[in-house]
Image (cartoon, grey):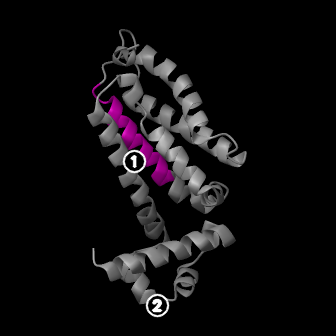
């Protein structure tokens, strides 16, 4: 990507993030973004179709980071239980580093776009990690997508609870608790994860 294009996109993203913190995502308009970024509407529309498109684009960087982490963890090998849910710590660290923005999105009805994108992204990561795992005998009655949505919902609830509480626990602590509780359920569903 041309550096000027990348810079313009970054300026627009920064403007949206700053305005979201100040006004709430839903209240932000394209005009507000253009004014804050000091660009014209035609420049905005040359890069994005909507405010939601701009937000999704900003979250795409997070997706790429999580995918790279997952790929590295899966390539390392090791115990399956250590490789499963590899997104958790990275996601928690990102949320801690951008806690104010996450809180603004979570507490704003308009943040549903960002949260929906994050849920979709986490679901894709979990599907990648669990698709080839055979269910334990008697557990095959469960719908695989149910398991994915359960794990995404549990993680999102924990992350939001943690952020709403001021993110006082270290990401590593939250990750350890989440993985401990979650892995017990994973072991009962997928015998391949039952490696000690």
Q: Is residue 17 left or right of residue 23?
A: left
Q: Is residue 80 left or right of residue 28?
A: left
Point 48% across, 72% down: residue: 13
When the figure is inspected, residue 23 is found, relative to residue 79, above or below; the finding is below
> Dot 1, how many residues are within 10 Å of its Cα: few (below 14), some (14-19), or many (20+)?
many
The reply to whether callout 2 and callout 1 are in contact (CB within 8 Å) is: no
Residue furthest top as drawn: 137
> Dot 2, how many residues are within 10 Å of its Cα: few (below 14), some (14-19), or many (20+)?
some
Magenta highlight: main SS: helix
x then y, percent, for residue 95:
56, 51
Residue where numbered disc 1 is placed: 66
Point 55% across, 30% down: residue: 176
Q: Which residues are magenta?
A: 116-132
x then y, percent, for residue 186:
45, 21
When the figure is inspected, residue 79 is found, relative to residue 21, above or below; the finding is above
Q: CA distance from mark 2 to mark 1?
A: 33 Å
x then y, percent, for residue 164:
70, 48
Point 70% across, 43% down: residue: 168
Quadrant where the image shows the C terminus? top left
x then y, percent, for residue 183:
48, 22
- Secondary structure beneath disc 1? helix
Which disc, if any, is residue 40?
2
Question: Is residue 175 highlighted in magenta?
Answer: no
């Amino acid at each position: 990507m041309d550096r000027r294009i990348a810079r313009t996109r970054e300026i627009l993203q920064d403007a949206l993030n700053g305005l979201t913190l100040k006004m709430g995502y839903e209240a932000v308009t394209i005009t507000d973004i253009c004014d804050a970024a000091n660009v014209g509407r035609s420049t905005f529309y040359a890069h994005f179709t909507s405010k939601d498109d701009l937000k999704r684009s900003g979250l795409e960087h997070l997706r790429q980071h999580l995918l790279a982490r997952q790929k590295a963890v899966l390539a390392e090998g090791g115990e399956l239980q250590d490789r499963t849910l590899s997104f958790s710590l990275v996601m928690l660290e990102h949320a801690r580093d951008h806690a104010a923005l996450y809180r603004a999105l979570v507490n704003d009805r308009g943040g549903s776009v960002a949260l929906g994108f994050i849920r979709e992204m986490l679901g894709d990561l979990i599907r990648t990690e669990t698709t080839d795992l055979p269910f334990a005998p008697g557990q095959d009655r469960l719908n695989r997508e149910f398991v994915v949505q359960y794990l995404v919902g549990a993680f999102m609830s924990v992350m939001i609870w943690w952020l709403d509480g001021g993110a006082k626990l270290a990401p590593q602590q939250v990750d350890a608790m989440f993985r401990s509780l979650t892995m017990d359920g994973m072991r009962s569903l997928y015998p391949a994860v039952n490696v000690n």
